[in-house]
Image: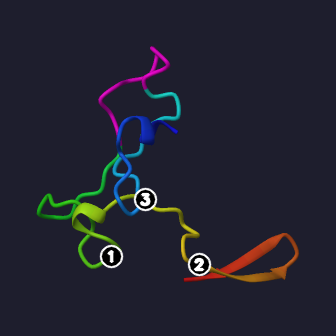
Amino acid sequence: MRNSWLNLINAQGGVMALVSDNYGLDATLATGVGITLRNSVAQPGITGIGPSGENVGWYPVLRDAKNLGPSVSGYTHYLH
């Protein structure tokens, strides 16, 4: 995971920037490029949604989700 090698994991386990899995290893990929979150006043995070400040970042979609089990064959439902 490139994010841990680049020190992009915050104290809460969120990823501060998304980068390619091969970032820094594949010379054909751009460097100095990543996807981050910013709100309308250029502060980290999106106002009113999820963590902000030093805890802002990308988190797994199923983090803290409750598995409600399958309701249709091949699909699992979750609740946040």
Task: Kindly identify the amino acid type of the residue bearing the numbered disc 3.
Answer: Gly
Q: CA distance from mark 2 to mark 1?
A: 16 Å
Q: Is residue 25 magenta?
A: yes
**Residue 80, x across and y down, in percent:** 54, 83
Q: Is residue 62 above or below residue 25?
A: below
**How would you classify the magenta stretch by its main secondary structure?**
loop
Give the image quarter of residue 14: bottom left
User: Residue 13 shows which numbered tag?
Assistant: 3
Q: CA distance from mark 3 to mark 2?
A: 16 Å
Q: Is residue 41 above or below residue 5?
A: below
- Residue hosting label 2: 65
Q: Write down the region rendered in magenta.
A: 24-34
Give the image quarter of residue 29: top left
Q: CA distance from mark 3 to mark 1?
A: 17 Å
**Residue at the outermost top position:** 27
User: Residue 49 shows which numbered tag?
Assistant: 1
Task: Kindly identify the amino acid type of the residue bearing the numbered disc 1.
Answer: Ile
Name the mark nearer the viewer: 3 or 2: 3
Give the image quarter of residue 11: bottom left
Looking at the image, residue 44 sits to the left or right of residue 64; the answer is: left
**Residue 6, x across and y down, in percent:** 37, 36
**Which class describes the residues within 10 Å of circle 2: few (<14), some (14-19), or many (20+)?**
few
**Residue 17, x across and y down, in percent:** 35, 47
Q: How many marks?
A: 3
Secondary structure at numbered mark 1: loop
Task: Kindly identify the amino acid type of the residue bearing the numbered disc 2.
Answer: Ala
Looking at the image, residue 73 sits to the left or right of residue 12; the answer is: right
Q: Earlier in the sequence, mark 2 or mark 1?
A: 1
**Residues at badges 3 and 2 in contact (C-beta under 8 Å)?**
no
Looking at the image, residue 33 sits to the left or right of residue 80; the answer is: left
Report the front residue among 10 and 36.
10
